[in-house]
Amino acid sequence: MKYFSKTIIILFSVAFLIRLLVALWSFNFRENTDVLRYRDWGRIAYLYGLPDTYRGDHLSFGTLPNNQPPGSLYIISSMYNLSIQTSKVILKITKSPPGSLQWVNGPLLDFFLRLPALVADLVIGYIIYQLVRTKSSEKLALLSSGLFLFNPLIIYNSSFWGQMDSINNLFLLLSIYFLYKQKVEYVMPFFFLSLFIKLSLLPIFPILILLMYFSSKNNIRRVSLSLIYGVAIILLLTLPISTTPWAWLTNYLSSNGLGELQNITAFAFNFWWIIFKPAILIGNPETLFGFSEVRLIGSPQDSILYLGISLFHWAIVLFMITFLQVLKFIIQRR
């Protein structure tokens, strides 16, 4: 088969099997706070509706309501509903009373909450394979895809931790794919969908705009249309949350744009975590709300002053220095 050769099928089957085993292994430990939040948001959306997840009225875990963009909520809510329906089928087949199968109440839901990221991993791996194959050899395409699919950090992030980074990264990759194909009109819709899942890739926005401008041969109209399409899609997708999507999104960004735990590193595989090696303290593990109280000891707050300037603003300066070099390179190479 041209697109699904025997080697590809084996490669992706092994990649999915490893992720499945890692996910099942993770259920031997107490679930991390992020997935516990996902459970709670899914429950609230199921019982009270999507908008209520952004309020603190019905929380059973954690002190903060939903702080993720609506795209993440739609995925969580869909997986929660799918888990409920699957549970009903299992109980009907096994003729078991509700609540009698412990693995249905816990691990099954946790697996469904991880499933979209697992699938996104595989799709990214396939896109990498196709892109490399068009420019190089089959062997190098398989190697490139394998380097992503079997990267321990990628597997840990989606399968063990249960994060959604693979999903918003997939939309970014699709955005770059259409940029590569010079189909500029599709670039911003897919990039905005990435931000609709998670805001982590927002700094790439100006770079994409500049690349779109040169890719379209300085056609501002095509770039503008792409932006309009992207904004329109996001506004339409926000309507289930609010009938005034623009005002809601503006308020959301002002409230959640900087995230939480304002340490210079927070549970991430990055340079500062290696340097400071902070200790993690949680609240009372016997209660759900207590377990959600997390503190990092040894990781400086971004508000600490250094030479009279906060670490937050030092970070912006360092980022802009690097960022401007990237922009300079793009402008010079057009």
Image: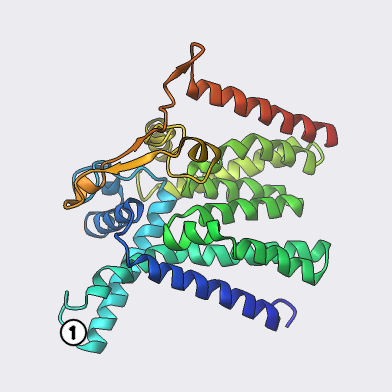
Q: Amino acid at mark 1?
A: Ser
Residue beneath disc 1: 96
Task: In the rendered view, tell whether residue 128 sits above or below residue 98.
Answer: above
Q: In the image, residue 261 lies at what x, y percent? A: 37, 35
Q: Residue at x 65, y 48 (%)?
A: 187
Q: Residue at x 72, y 69 (%)?
A: 142
Find residue 263 and report its image quarter.
top left
Please give the count of numbered marks on the rendered protein.
1
Q: Secondary structure at mark 1?
A: loop
Residue count near mark 1 (Cα–Cα under 10 Å), binned few <14, some 14–19, many ≥20: few
Q: Nearer the viewer, residue 184 or 130?
A: 130
Q: In the image, residue 184 lies at what x, y percent? A: 71, 47
Q: In the image, residue 237 lies at what x, y percent? A: 45, 50
The reply, left or right, for residue 309 in relation to residue 106 is: right
- Of all residues shown, which one is farthest toward the top? 308
Find residue 143 and report its image quarter.
bottom right
Q: Residue at x 82, y 40 (%)?
A: 217
The C terminus lies in which quarter of the figure?
Answer: top right
Find residue 315 and report its image quarter.
top right
The reply, left or right, for residue 114 in relation to residue 204 is: left
Task: In the rendered view, tell whether residue 30 sits above or below residue 55.
Answer: below
Q: Is residue 268 visible in the rendered structure shown here?
A: yes
Q: Is residue 59 visible in the rendered structure shown here?
A: no
Q: Nearer the viewer, residue 273 or 104?
A: 273
Q: Nearer the viewer, residue 94 or 316?
A: 316
Q: Nearer the viewer, residue 88 or 234?
A: 88
Colouring chosen for the image of the structure:
rainbow
The N terminus lies in which quarter of the figure?
Answer: bottom right
Q: In the image, residue 129 lies at what x, y percent? A: 71, 66
